[in-house]
Amino acid sequence: MISHARGLKDGAGTGPLEAGPIPKGKVLVDMGSGVIADAVSSLLRSYGYQCFTTEPPTCEPDVIIVDSSTIDKKTADRYPKSKLILLETDAHARNIAGPILFQKVHGIISCTADSAKFKKALEAIADGQVWIDNMTIKNFLLDAGLISSKGEILGFTPQEKIIAESICRGDTNKEIAQKLHLSVHTVKTHLRSTMRKAGAVNRSALASTVTQLLGKEK
């Protein structure tokens, strides 16, 4: 990220120096639609970013934003230090897993995200975090056959579904066992199976997956 500080030398000037906008970084917006690219660039400039819709000739962008139509151009290969963001301009896009697997994508943002969430995602990615919004993850789960189009969990047995939802509520294994009239050992067995299917390494990750990805609240 780029930051600049400005000040006055001793004895220079007669009043305080008025601060201008501080550039946060350079962003290359490489998208199939020029209209959308211009709109995204305008929004980013309002946040203090320097934006380009063509590759800058003399500097390397900090962030590159592409869509499903330009991700295969491999623009990011020419700028290995840049962070790559995929902006899903098609709210119903589901066939993006392939390109993502072959690109070093640092974040995926849906076109349905509001400006506040877009700004938060961009700042998180620029800070070194990985950002994938819920809509994109739901699309991946749909493709994998793990949830239905209505967001219902598929692939879990009825008991595994109850256990997953119980974990989201913060229930202990003992409480779940009492609710299902099972032994704690049996609950642990079901829990391990549920975590494996959800790709979760622990119960906290399972709760996060079920809560955030399926749009449920604890």
Image: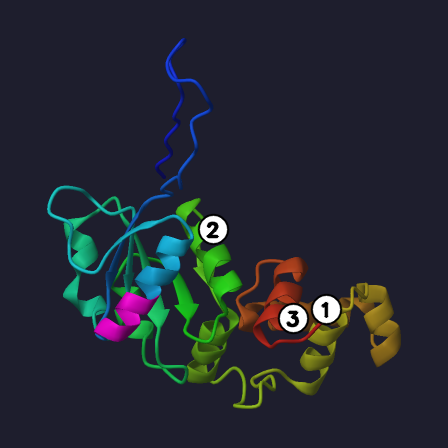
Q: Distance between the residues labelled 1 and 2?
A: 25 Å
Q: Do the residues labelled 3 and 1 touch (CB within 8 Å)?
A: yes
In the picture, the disc for residue 124 is 2
Quadrant in the picture for the N terminus: top left
Residue 68 can be seen in this image? no
Please check the rendered image and state whether residue 10 is part of the magenta-colored stretch, yes or no: no
Residue type of the residue flagged with mark 1: Cys
- Report the residue marked by disc 3: 211
Amino acid type at circle 2 is Ala
Q: Which amino acid does label 3 sit on?
A: Thr
Q: Where is residue 51 in the image (x, y as percent from the top left)?
A: 27, 53
Point out the tag, 3 or 1, that comes first from the N-terminus: 1
Which residue carries the number 1 mark?
A: 168
> Is the stretch drawn in magenta largely helix, strand or loop?
helix
Query: Label 3, label 2: how many angstroms apart (C-alpha)?
Result: 21 Å
Residue 193 horizontal/vertical position (percent): 61, 72
- Circles 1, 2 touching at the beta carbon (< 8 Å): no
